Image (cartoon, rainbow, N blue to C red):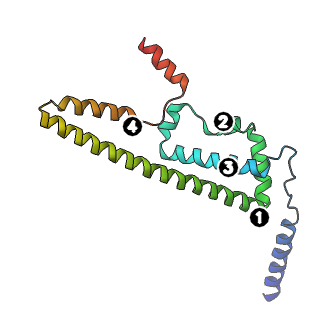
């Protein structure tokens, strides 16, 4: 019984060691995307995927297809990206450095956008205060402020959507209006 167990273990060790012998590494592609460009591509891809996950319908309304947009913007194709990504993935330290750079870029963007948002909130607050003050003055003068308030609300609705459709859709809307 002990001899059979030893033979089985020996057989498993031989099979395991033979199965690990034929690992092929990905060769460096001729059209390898340079590391700095790969960082830019992966940063853009991350942002587009985040946008798609945040509001898929809004992104679809714009007519942007994330992968095609990236390939066109960086003048690469899907096969070139796939080969480069596979090559870098096998170069663990390079790939880790690339993704660390992507994380740093996204964090910088987030910090910058947060500070811009803070300025925007302060600006909107000051506009609201000015509107309230001006409406109080108009009320004290006996002027009808209800129509002014509804006009202000309409203008705010127009400003609320900051993601504009692509020019082609804008032209279609304008043509259909005429």
Left or right? Give the position of 158 relative to 51: left
Q: Which residue was labeled with disc 2?
A: 68
User: At numbered mark 4, what does the secondary structure look like: helix, strand or loop?
Assistant: helix
Q: Is residue 32 left or right of residue 74?
A: right
**Image side of residue 99 versus residue 15, left or right:** left
Q: Going from the N terminus, do you reach mark 4 or mark 2 first?
A: 2
- Mark 2 or mark 1, which has the lower sequence index? 2
- In the rendered structure, find residue 29 and report the number of the disc placed on it: none
Q: Which residue is mark 1?
A: 93
Left-right relation of 32 to 104? right
Label 3: state its secondary structure: helix
Mark 4 or 1, nearer chain start: 1
Distance from the alpha carbon under mark 2 to that under mark 3: 14 Å
Tag 3 residue: 42
**Under tag 2, what secondary structure?**
helix
Earlier sequence position, callout 2 versus callout 3: 3
Is mark 2 in CB contact (under 8 Å) with mark 3?
Answer: no
Asked if marks 3 and 1 touch (Cβ < 8 Å), the reply is no
Residue that sits furthest to the bottom in the current view: 2
Q: CA distance from mark 4 to mark 3?
A: 30 Å
Distance (Cα) linking label 3 and label 1: 16 Å
Label 3 crowd bin: few (<14), some (14–19), many (20+), radius 10 Å: some
Q: Which mark is residue 160?
A: 4
User: Going 78% across and 55% down the picture, which residue do you hit?
Assistant: 88
């Amino acid at each position: 019984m002990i001899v059979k167990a030893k033979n089985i273990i020996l057989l498993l060790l031989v099979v395991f060691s033979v199965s690990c012998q034929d690992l092929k590494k990905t060769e460096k592609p001729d059209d390898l995307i340079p590391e700095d460009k790969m960082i830019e591509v992966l940063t853009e891809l991350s942002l587009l995927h985040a946008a798609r996950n945040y509001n898929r319908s809004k992104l679809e309304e714009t007519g942007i297809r994330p992968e095609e947009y990236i390939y066109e913007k960086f003048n690469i194709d899907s096969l070139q990206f796939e080969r480069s990504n596979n090559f870098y993935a096998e170069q663990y330290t390079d790939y880790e450095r690339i993704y660390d750079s992507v994380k740093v870029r996204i964090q910088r963007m987030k910090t910058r956008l947060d500070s811009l948002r803070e300025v925007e909130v302060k600006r909107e607050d000051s506009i609201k205060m000015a509107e309230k003050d001006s409406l109080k003055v108009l009320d004290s003068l006996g002027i009808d402020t209800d129509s002014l308030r509804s006009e202000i609300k309409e203008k705010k609705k127009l400003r609320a959507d900051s993601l504009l459709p692509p020019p082609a859709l804008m032209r279609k809307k304008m043509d259909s209006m005429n």
